[in-house]
Amino acid sequence: MENKVTEKPATRSFSATMLAVAWSFIGLRRKKDFDQDVGGLNPLYVLFAGLAGTAIFVGSLIAIVHFVVP
């Protein structure tokens, strides 16, 4: 029987979570980075980062429409 040491991945910071969420908005992420994110992201950080990313995206769309349509 082998002794496998399972290490709990380190929790990532809020800025690292924002970066991971930004890449997921774009849809591009390396498998290695995704695997690191799966165990190390704080769900509360992901929720706030997703809400902030959505607000920025919607705000930028509204700003673009405001400038294009008189």
Image (spheres, rainbow, N blue to C red):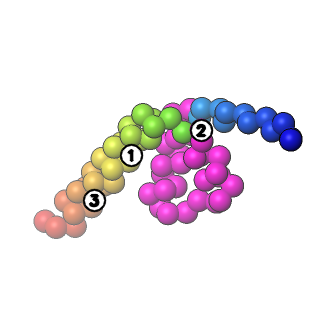
Q: Residue furthest bottom?
A: 69
Say which amino acid is labelled 2: Gly
In the image, 46: left or right of 1?
left
Magenta residues, as a range? Answer: 13-40
- Determine which residue is flagged by label 1: 50
Q: Looking at the magenta stretch, what is its main secondary structure?
A: helix
* Residue 18 sits inside the magenta stretch: yes
Residue at screen point 86% across, 41% down: 1
Answer with mark 3 or mark 2, whichever residue precedes in sequence. 2
Q: Residues within 10 Å of mark 3 (few under 14, many from 20)?
A: few
Please report the residue visible at 39 percent of the width from the left and 40 percent of the height from the top. 47
Tell me which amino acid carries mark 1. Gly
* Residue nearest the observer in this picture, 30 or 65: 30
Which numbered marker is on residue 36? none
Q: Quadrant of residue 8?
A: top right
In this figure, which residue is indicated by the disc labeled 3? 61
| Residue bearing the label numbered 2 | 40
Q: Nearer the viewer, mark 1 or mark 3?
A: 1
Question: Type of residue at label 3?
Answer: Leu
Q: Which residue is situated farthest in the front direction here? A: 1
User: Residue at (28%, 54%) from the top-left corner?
Assistant: 58
Q: Relative to 42, say whether 57 is above or below.
A: below
Q: Quadrant of residue 6?
A: top right
Q: Work out whether residue 40 can be spotted.
A: yes
Q: Is residue 10 above or below residue 35?
A: above
SS at circle 1: helix
Is tag 1's residue or tag 3's residue first in the polypeptide sequence?
1
* Structural distance between the alpha carbons of marks 3 and 2: 31 Å
